Image (cartoon, grey):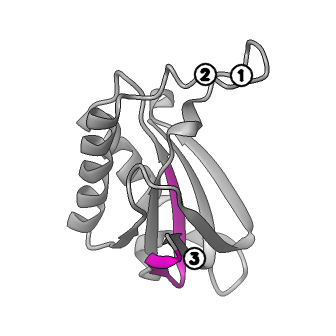
Amino acid sequence: MKAVIQRAKNASVTVDENIVGEINHGLVVLLGVTHDDTEEDVQYLVNKIIHLRIFEDDEQKMNLSLKDTNGSILSVSQFTLYADTRKGRRPSFVHAAKPEEAIRLYETFNEALRKENIHVETGEFGAMMDVTLTNDGPVTIIIDSKDK
């Protein structure tokens, strides 16, 4: 499971010109699921993301976590994180999980965040989405659960 996390001053996701998810201070999480991901991968990412010290304290040092700052998460499923571009010019997505498994783990991820008292807004799984954000910093970090 891969997550691209972006520290955001604000963010929203729109489907068919309707805002379906919106946050102010927090993180945008683009989440990709592959074939062999499990609930263990979900828990690893949730724990890492909510406790990662990437928010600035009073001295402008990255010492605070999402939990410390009471930030929110805008969670967006993103199968393209598993694009394979080694051959040709058109990416292959064979490493992305099948939709029925990906949605299950994506929803498990969002629910695990909520159990940690994180306010979570989401995109719409499988939809064409427009994601808008003001990247704060900018701070963008990639986390892969296989690196644990």
Instruction: Give the image location of residue 115, x and y in percent.
Output: 20, 65
Decide if residue 33 is on the left or right side of residue 143.
Answer: left
Q: Is residue 101 above or below residue 117?
A: above
6 vs 8: above or below: above
Q: Earlier in the sequence, mark 2 or mark 3?
A: 3
* Element under disc 2: loop
Residues marked 1 and 2 touching at CB (< 8 Å):
yes
In the rendered image, residue 27 lying in the magenta stretch gets the answer yes
Q: Are marks 2 and 3 in contact (CB under 8 Å)?
A: no
Label 2 Cα crowd, 10 Å radius (few <14 / some 14-19 / many 20+): some
Q: Position of residue 13 (x, y in %)?
A: 52, 70
Residue at 30% across, 58% down? 110
Mark 1: which secondary structure? Answer: loop
Viewer-closest of 69 and 113: 113
Q: How far apart in space, not on screen, are marks 1 and 3 (Cα)?
A: 29 Å
- Cα–Cα gap, marks 2 and 3: 29 Å
Count of marks, rendered view: 3
Q: Which mark is residue 85?
A: 1
- Residue at 43 percent across and 63 percent down: it is 123
The amino acid on which the numbered mark 3 sits, given as a three-letter code, is: Ala
Report the front residue among 144 and 18.
Answer: 18
Which mark is in front, 2 or 3? 2
Residue 11 numbered mark, or none: 3
Q: Which residues are magenta?
A: 17-30
